[in-house]
Amino acid sequence: MVGAGLSGLTGAYHLKERRVLVLEAGSVPGGVCRQGSFRGLAYPAGSAYFYYLGDPSWEAWYRGLGLPLADSLVDKPVSALFHRGRWYPDCFSKPGLQNLPLPCQAINGLLNLTDKLAAWEDAWDPFGSDKLPNPELDRITLAHFLEKEEGLPPQVTNILTPYCRSCLGAGPHAISAWAGLFFLMSEFSEKSRTAAFPGGNARIAQALAQKLSPPVRCGQTLVRLEPALHGVDLLLWDSQGDRGYRLQAGVVILALGKFAVRHILPSQAGWNLEVFNRFRYSSYVVAALCGRISLESPGYENWVVGEENFSDFIMSPRTPQAGEARVMTVFAPQPYAQSREALLRIQPEVKAKELLPAVESHFPGTAGEVEEIHLYRFGHAQIVPYPGFLTSLKGNIAQSQGRIILANSDLEGLPCIEAAIVQGQKAAHQARTFLTG
């Protein structure tokens, strides 16, 4: 298994009856499921929450990992919107929608949209499927759907922009209407609940990693692989031992983003490598503002409208004791379609100096309470489901060619942990089928 993000860890977990060697280039497993610590306080430094759907199969999966789902449910209001100096709590529920600063016609249109999404909810389950319900919605942008087909004013698109940038990697004018509506379906749903652990989804990655033997081997970068007669040859670089070496495996699962896979796979592996150019990504920065921060925010997830430098934030703990250490995790998706290299040319100190004044401009006094800034750059990019991508992906890109199997959430085209988990499960099933004949 190459890659110890959530997809790779899940795949290895479902193959734990076999000897699975998990290789990770980074210093710790987890991928975007990162956790930070400030004075003993755990906080999410990446993927922060998931949806509790009440589905028996998902419940059994989490229970098998020893994760207490009942204790992880987030108290309402889960989401809150900050717009022009005012908070709008519970902004994705029907009562909350009616309080948004929008014309009555727009609010009625949003309420009708929630009813429409509720009717689609049971049928829209794309994970692991080669088919996409209502594929026509993947051909247009979310902004087009909202404004042209639903007749909603641009103010609605504007209010949803921070949500789309943070969750889907780009704004409503750049993402598929299908992808945007699928994510909003979870927010508007009366069936699903939001769940989160103190350190975010790193808790899930940690639970998976603890089930593996041998443990994840970190600091191992895959440079190249070649199909061999009875296996796959891997050329690796061990950053801890400062040496290169070779391994042979019966089956290799590449739980990596396709932007990396296309540089690793040889042309004779079986894929047309040009197909991986369909995958487009945005870059992400997460900043943890640490100190005795007194900011009061009504939601667990707090969305800020009209701010280019960041989209949303989470407070840990949500309700502090007097004088208690606290962390404000700020999510800062970078402008879509601008290269990741542009971000990497900026020194971390410069990025921190951009974020802190932006936070201060909305929440005066916060900057003076910040004692430390912990800056995280994601080692890989976030998949962007642009119009047409999901329909071109479904059933058109093979997950395996012989002994080489692909995984990662980007093969589902949706940047969420459920997509990563499903991909890991599918890859494990294909590996087991191949090895058992």
Image (cartoon, rainbow, N blue to C red):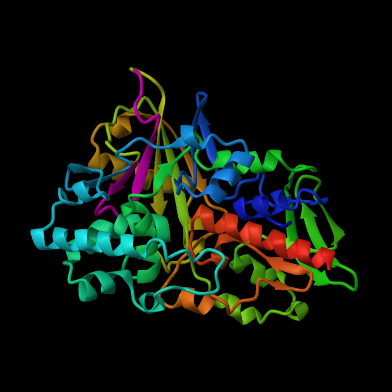
Q: Which residue lies furthest to the left in this view?
A: 104
Residue 40 percent across, percent down from the top left:
52, 24
Q: Which residue is drawn at the image coordinates 77% and 61% (left, top)?
A: 432
Does 168 appear in magenta?
Answer: no
User: Is residue 96 found left or right of 320 in the rendered image?
Assistant: left
The residue drawn where x is 28% and y is 35% is: 297
Can you give x and y, in whole percent of width and height, for residue 208 in the image? 65, 43
67 up-or-down from 379: above or below: above
Q: Which residue is drawn at 35% across and 64% down?
A: 181
- Determine if residue 332 is in view: yes
For the N terminus, give its image quadrant: bottom right
User: Which quarter of the picture shows residue 162?
Assistant: bottom left
Which quadrant of the structure image shows residue 256?
A: bottom right
Against 257, residue 6 (above or below) is above
Q: Give the extent of the magenta segment.
A: 301-321
- The relative height of residue 110 versus residue 50 in the rendered view (above or below) is below
Q: Is residue 177 above or below residue 35?
A: below
Q: Image quadrant of residue 170?
A: bottom left
Pick the front one: 126 or 274: 126
- Left or right placement of residue 104 versus residue 212 in this view: left
Where is residue 31 shown, x and y percent of the image?
59, 50
